[in-house]
Amino acid sequence: GLEVTVFSNYSPSRRELLQVGAGLVASAMVRPTLGLAAAVSDYKITPGPGRARLKGGGGSNTDVWAYDGDVPGPVIRLRQGKPARIVVENRLQEDTTVHWHGIRLPNAMDGVPGLTQPPIKPGERFVYEFTPPDAGTFWYHPHANSLQQLGRGLAGALVVEEAEPVPADRDVVWVLGDWRLDSDGNIAPGFGNRMEAAMSGRVGNTVTLNGTLPGDQNVRAGERIRLRLVNTSLARIMALRFEGHRPVIVAVDGQPCDPHEPEGGRLLLAPAMRLDLIVDMQGEPGRRYAVIDDYYDGLAYDLTSFAYAGQAPLRKNPLDAPMRLPRNPLPEPDLQSAKRHELALQGGMPSMGNMTGGGKMQGMGGMSGGTGGMAHGRAIWSINGTSMTGDGHADMLPLVTLMRDSSHVVTMRNETAWWHPMHLHGFSFRVLSRNGVPVPHNQWADTVLLAPKDTVEVAFVADNPGDWMLHCHVTDHQTAGLMTVLRVT
Ligand code: C2O
Ligand code: CU
Ligand code: CU
């Protein structure tokens, strides 16, 4: 069912009272110690082996890699402007790091091995300390051996709470995951298949919601839900439609926007992207309404359903309360003085249609390297003719150096036949335009999806010094060259 985190009688003081005495380092349930107990939110998360219920029938388990033994990892809840201290203890058999995706934090806390920190070796710990400046929906994942570590289950949601949340009856997180399972329900091998890497990446065959095969989501007529969507897939893009409902987008990648309904009622959610929605449950008591993902041609499926209780509606008309979230303290880029940069995204296979990796490509798994349009060596993709591969390492030379506090407009041109959710570490950027058309609703993001041949302009102030990664979040694309580094000094 739905994960209930905040009720209508929520108030910070009540919440803080509940958390007093929760202990300095919370584990499984992960409660930040706020307010009276400590000035710092303390967490400990432990990446290591775990098991998940990914097979039909409910009983059997799949071996995964997980934070605290569970997929997804615990929802980490921090408070805007309050310091956080997160201990990561590595119980994997290999090096790892944690990247706090979308959080504007000091470069040394960004979790890129070789570039911002040494990798955390098996048995070792690393303490991440930062103060999240922005409220919103973020997530965390490894930045080492990403294809396997993320693909085997290491991911979790990170929610930074506003001082004053918008009124809602419930605050619900849906961590959406995508797995490729073999016929026994185990994670299929073959990570880093070069054919897939040159196309859509490792799209799986099993979608999960908060770590399990999605069943019905129990709702009550008349309630207002704040729904936080997080796509933690390696490669699966989703396009969700809520049958019989009109979700309103109130934040993109954690950053508030003008509340608006999605174009055509379709919520496009590529890997690493988040959407905060306000959904008024205006369906009829006793009925079910499907949540449909129809991104891949001919492969629409019901992700889940809203199952209405038979109860009388909680209220007759939708809650009459504001939906607009307060803007985060993002520096506004000065477009007049901004320096302009162009990034050409290149490589991959010539178009083969809107193909999914899953079934169709598994059969071609034997083909690797040296085929037709693919580049030689490990690089399949490039940015401005240069390919950085892997997950992060010391010898990544920055593509450009930006003067601290100056404004920048980056134009990304997708010259490939594939979709790319392009992500910049350490900043949120204003999404200015797509194919020459201004992007409405005051949209900021840290990950922007480019369709084949799209040109997207984004702008930001380079206020945070350090070496910051910019890469496609289809992990096969990232590790096969669709990655670069921006240096701010
Ligand atoms: Cu979620 Cu390098 O990114
Ligand atoms: Cu990131
Ligand atoms: Cu890509």
Image (tube, grey):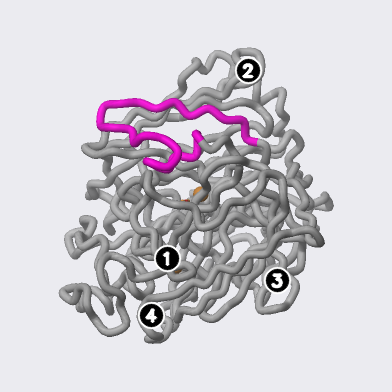
On the image, which quarter does residue 267 sit in? bottom right
Between label 2 and label 1, give the one nearer the viewer.
1
Question: Which residue is label 2 attached to?
Answer: 39
Residue 106: give its label: none
Residue 178 seen in the figure: no
Mark closest to the chain's N terminus, 4 or 1: 4
On the image, which quarter does residue 158 sit in? top right
Q: Is residue 93 left or right of residue 443?
A: left
Crowd tier of the residue under label 3, counting other residues whose Cα lies within 10 Å: few below 14, some 14–19, many 20 or above: some
Residue 433: give its label: 3
Which residue does the image show at 64% across and 45% down from the upper left? 136
Q: Is residue 113 magenta?
A: yes
Residue 355: give its label: 4
Mark closest to the chain's N terminus, 3 or 4: 4
Give me the C-alpha separation between circle 4 and circle 2: 50 Å
Between label 2 and label 3, give the one nearer the viewer.
3
Q: Provide residue 5's location: percent of width, then percent of height.
A: 58, 38
User: Do the CB atoms of the residues marked 2 and 3 lie less than 8 Å apart?
Assistant: no
Q: Quadrant of the C terminus?
A: top right
Mark closest to the chain's N terminus, 2 or 3: 2
Query: Disc 4 residue type?
Result: Met
Which residue does the image show at 79% across and 56% down from the upper left? 334
Magenta-tinted stretch: 108-132
